[in-house]
Image: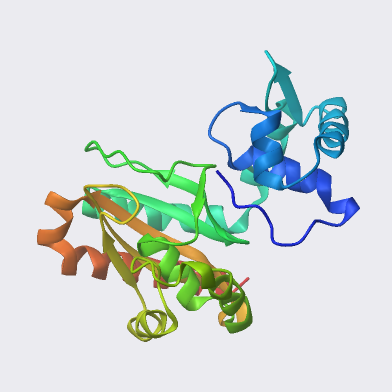
Amino acid sequence: MMSTTALAPAAQDRVLLVLATLAQWNGPVTAQQLADATGMPRSSLYRQLARLKHWGFVQEEDGSYAPGPMGLQLAQGFDATSSLVHMARMDMQRLVHQSHESVGLIVAVNDRAICLDMLESPQALRCSFVKGRSVPLRRGATAKCLLAHMPPARRDAVLDAWQDESADPALPDRASLAAIRAAGYACSQNEVDEGVWGASAPLFGPGQRLAGCMTLMAPTARGLPRAEELTRMVVVAAARVSRLLSLT
């Protein structure tokens, strides 16, 4: 599910690593799966799980683990206070109304793209981006847009971690990311989900700091014939949100 970190986490970070791994897992996970994903010894893993269970962040059932009820309180608190979600919502709604397609609000955290909000198209679409879910920051318009516009040192750290996979033609490189940066948007098809086309534009806060991105997603059969029109729509919507964010 999640790649094991190259370096062992500091003792104070182990509990957070376990919690982050559980959050990224789509469903219950066994202790062995957690140990494989985190690289932690079983003895240390069980200590962290016990702490998280005590505080309600993890629940155990039939020998498997999943996020606990305290996670819901954190999510509700985030929804209530996130200025990015609040400021983007109106333009996301407008974009869905104009395009009749699905629109997501997504941010980069470490090497993952996390969906903060998702407004569904009135037309059916199945894709990996669901509110609260994350995907690896590797393929697709969203990942490329976020990578292209994040601070250079952070981008280089992500790209350098892929050195052993440099032969994979689907992974973006520095040249392709520079082209996306110059264009101001990224498009893709069939890279994350088969049969899905996407266009993504960056969102900037004060000082042109990357805040996230807005991504429009459509079935390839609908998206490709309207690619230029839909791309222009998401770029305009993202620019409006960026203007709002820059005033905060």
Provide residue 11's location: percent of width, then percent of height.
90, 52
Quadrant (top left, top right, bottom left, bottom right) of the C terminus: bottom right
Which image quadrant: the N terminus?
A: top right
- Quarter of the image holding residue 121? top left
Is the residue 90 above or below the residue 244 in the image?
above
Q: Is residue 205 left or right of residue 226?
A: right
Q: Is residue 101 left or right of residue 14?
A: left
Q: In this view of the protein, can residue 75 be seen by the observer?
A: no
In the picture, measured across the screen, residue 96 lies left or right of residue 117, that is left
Q: Residue at x 57, y 79 (%)?
A: 156
Task: Using the rendered view, name the quadrant where residue 132 is placed.
Answer: top right
Q: Is residue 207 left or right of residue 44?
A: left
Q: Residue at x 71, y 29 (%)?
A: 31
Looking at the image, what colour scheme do you see? rainbow
Give the percent coordinates (x, y) of residue 110: 63, 61
Q: Position of residue 152 (x, y in %)?
A: 58, 83
Between 214 and 151, the one lying in front of the other is 151
Q: Residue at x 86, y 39 (%)?
A: 44
- Viewer-proximal residue, 100 or 91? 100
152 up-or-down from 39: above or below:
below
Q: Nearer the viewer, residue 162 or 117?
A: 162
For the point 65% across and 44% down, which residue is it?
37
Which residue ends up furthest to the top in the rendered image?
A: 62
Above or below, 209 relative to 81: below
Q: Position of residue 220 (x, y in %)?
A: 17, 52
The image quadrant of residue 62 is top right
